[in-house]
Image (tube, rainbow, N blue to C red):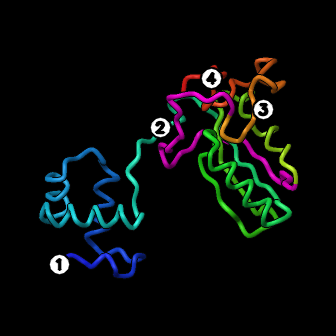
Amino acid sequence: MSIRNVKDDSTKLDELDIKIIRALNEDARQKLTELAKNVDSSRPTVYKRLEDLINRRVIRINVCLNIAKLGFHVACVGFEVKSRDMKQKLINTLQKCPRVLILTCPSEKANLSLYMFGENLDTLRSCIESLREYQGAEVVYLFYAEPQIYPEAFRLNIFPEKLEKSPCGMDCSKCLSYAHELCLGCPATKKYKGPL
């Protein structure tokens, strides 16, 4: 099988691409030789395809955590953000948040939606309440859910070197929920009291 030119349409996936992606979904730790065998192709071909998929940002290979196994709680929050500038500012902030699992832009009244976790319900509630403080953004729906059924795990932003302030700029030591031990703090900060 010939290798496609990287300049080809970057949105197209062929049968080999799909086989590689499926095999990696099964086990991303398999060796390249094993992957080539599992997709019925040669090692050099699979290497080039894999490199192409990564370079085109079609796939990313990450470690994911099963938040259900950790006993974490989840919630879905929908915002109505009044202006494009405010929406982009909020998106930029939420992308850095260690608690955000998924961030989407629906086309309904709630034009920004996120799925987030908390190590316990009090921490999750505290984080959601802090989101209500963003000017120009109103929470239009909120529901708590049991941990996910599918996918089994998510990529989380883990901070081995803790920061003084959270990525959104909040200071846990100035938060009432943190002071009253209702919140474990931001997982990115030195004030964090949780397992991450």
- Mark earlier in primary sequence (3, 1): 1
Q: Which image quadrant is residue 109 in?
A: bottom right
Label of residue 126 in the image = 3
Q: Is residue 94 left or right of residue 16?
A: right
Mark 3: few/some/many CA within 10 Å (<14, 14-19, 20+): some
Label of residue 2 in the image = 1
Q: Position of residue 129 (x, y in %)?
A: 82, 38
Secondary structure under badge 4?
Answer: loop
Label of residue 76 in the image = none
Give me the C-alpha separation between circle 4 and circle 2.
Answer: 21 Å
Give me the C-alpha separation between circle 3 and circle 1.
Answer: 54 Å
Q: Position of residue 38 (x, y in %)?
A: 18, 57
* Residue at the (59%, 39%) spot, across then down: 147
- Mark earlier in primary sequence (3, 4): 3
Residue bearing the label numbered 2: 65
Extent of the magenta region: 136-165
Mark 4: few/some/many CA within 10 Å (<14, 14-19, 20+): some
- Mark earlier in primary sequence (3, 2): 2
Q: Is residue 179 left or right of residue 44?
A: right
Residue bearing the label numbered 4: 190
Q: Position of residue 99 (x, y in %)?
A: 63, 39
- Mark earlier in primary sequence (4, 2): 2
* Residue at the (69%, 63%) spot, across then down: 105
6 over 42 or under it: above or below: below
Give me the C-alpha separation between circle 3 and circle 4.
Answer: 18 Å
- Mark earlier in primary sequence (1, 2): 1
Give me the C-alpha separation between circle 3 and circle 2.
Answer: 22 Å
**Main SS of the magenta segment?**
loop
Residue type (three-letter) at the residue carrying disc 1: Ser
* Residue at the (61%, 30%) spot, across then down: 163
| CB contact under 8 Å: marks 1 and 2 | no
